[in-house]
Image (tube, helix red, strand yellow):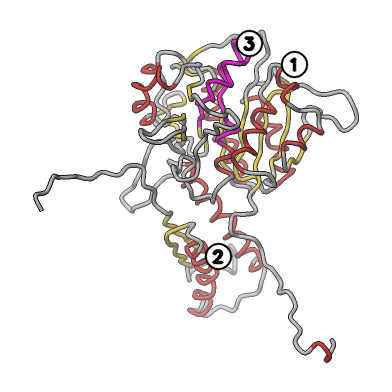
Amino acid sequence: MSTLRGVTITEGKIGNNVSGESREFGLIGGGVAIVGTGKAALATAYKLLRPSDAVALGIDAAYDTANDVRVYRHIAEFYRMAGEGKALHLMLVDKADTPLEMIENAKALVLESGAISDIAFMFNPEAAYVETLVDGLNADVKLAIPALQTFADWCDTHDMPLHTILEGRGIGDTLSALADLRDLTVGEAALSAHKVTLVCGQDWTYADGITSALGKKFADVGTFLGCIAAQAWNRNPGEVATQNLTNSTLGSWLVGGLSNHKKYTEVYESLETMNAKGYVFPIKYTGLSGYWWNDGHTCAPIVMDADGNMNQHTIYYSHTMDMAKRALRLAYLPEVKKPVELDAGKLPSGMVGYYNALGNEIFKFFAGKGLISDGETSTDANSDLLVEKVLNVQFGVIPTGCVNEIKGTINLKSN
């Protein structure tokens, strides 16, 4: 310490990052290994921070063309929307793998990072692949929806809550026959895949330049993932003020379409129904130039129970739940295995207040950042810390709202 400096100011210690800015992202799907040291191999995790990191692995636009895949496409679109510097964890698997068959590798990718908040499953089938439709969806895509929910449940159980984004490639031309993603079943049981978002939109012009018929029916999950990464986790990926998909200079998204390779103008009359069924696709707004995602739907019904509890029927509600759980876990972990003085076997009011404050500080921080509306923590004073040794705490979080539509009236006035 020097008395000659007069005033000495040192940097303070920074605690755990709970703002959501530490989020990382994942991309997994079919590709082809590249021979050579330091080049892309299958079933290997790579952390990218910019498109040039993919190029260094041998993955570029020429790689996509030569192998009839959309790997670099999704990476480039992710960074076009999100900007460089965001961590994107990439894993290539065999092109023969369906999304269902990618899940074990996806677990390895998630474990490698531990911080992935959203992972996109791209589907680049082999040339011999035969597209089969079930309820207007690619059969392998439809089969993957409940499996990805189970995968997300597994991640949650292992303290890595995340959301999955599935490439809904090759939807049928008869859009009225598409399955209702908000009313799915597995056998006789209703399915709520609230951790799965199905993207079936594409940059039609880019898709039209792909030689293969299979390639033309891809869906731009990389673009959607980039929109998620570009903004705070409680924001709608279709936000009109900030998430315009079109870039005229780059020639990106000049014509939007669906993964049946139909232009927006050809499918316009069916889009309201598709939106109600929970599909994610590009739309236009009269008077504005460009395309936007319609919303951040999940493959789940919209539920509000008698107690006011709401399910995760949008991706931004899913994020709110995930990020709250991650932050609350970090806040409470230091309390594990600490001695606690009891009063007649119960938690004294001071300790109840202390435990409540731990959770409420997280909610206060998130609310101050505009990430949630409010939150409340309630600790059970009767928690058995002697035999079960379990502290029971209830958390309630109120997410921020979202304006999806503005309804008004207008009149001609005489004065």
How would you rate the neighbour count of disc 2 (Cα within 10 Å): few for under 14, some for 14-19, many for 20 or more?
A: some
Residue under the point 68% across and 34% down: 106
Does the magenta segment cover residue 220? yes
Residue under numbered circle 2: 391
Q: Distance between the residues labelled 3 and 1?
A: 11 Å
* Residue 62, above or below 248: above
Residue 47: x and y, percent? 75, 41
Residue named by callout 1: 66
Closer to the camera in the image, 18 or 224: 224
The total of numbered circles placed on residues is 3
Q: Distance between the residues labelled 1 and 2?
A: 57 Å
**x and y percent of residue 264 in the render?**
43, 22
Asked if residue 94 is among those painted magenta in the image, a careful observer would answer no
User: Which residue is found at the position 63% from the left and 37% from the top?
Assistant: 78
Q: Residues within 10 Å of mark 1 (few under 14, many from 20)?
A: few
Q: Which residue lies furthest to the front in this view?
A: 415
* Label 3 or label 1, whichever comes before in sequence order: 1
In the rendered image, residue 389, in percent from the top left (x then y), is placed at 60, 65
Specify the amino acid type for callout 1: Ala
Residue 287 horizontal/vertical position (percent): 36, 35
State whether residue 12 is above or below residue 362: below
Rendered residue at 47%/65% (across/down): 377
The magenta segment is: 198-224
Residue to which mark 3 is pinned = 212
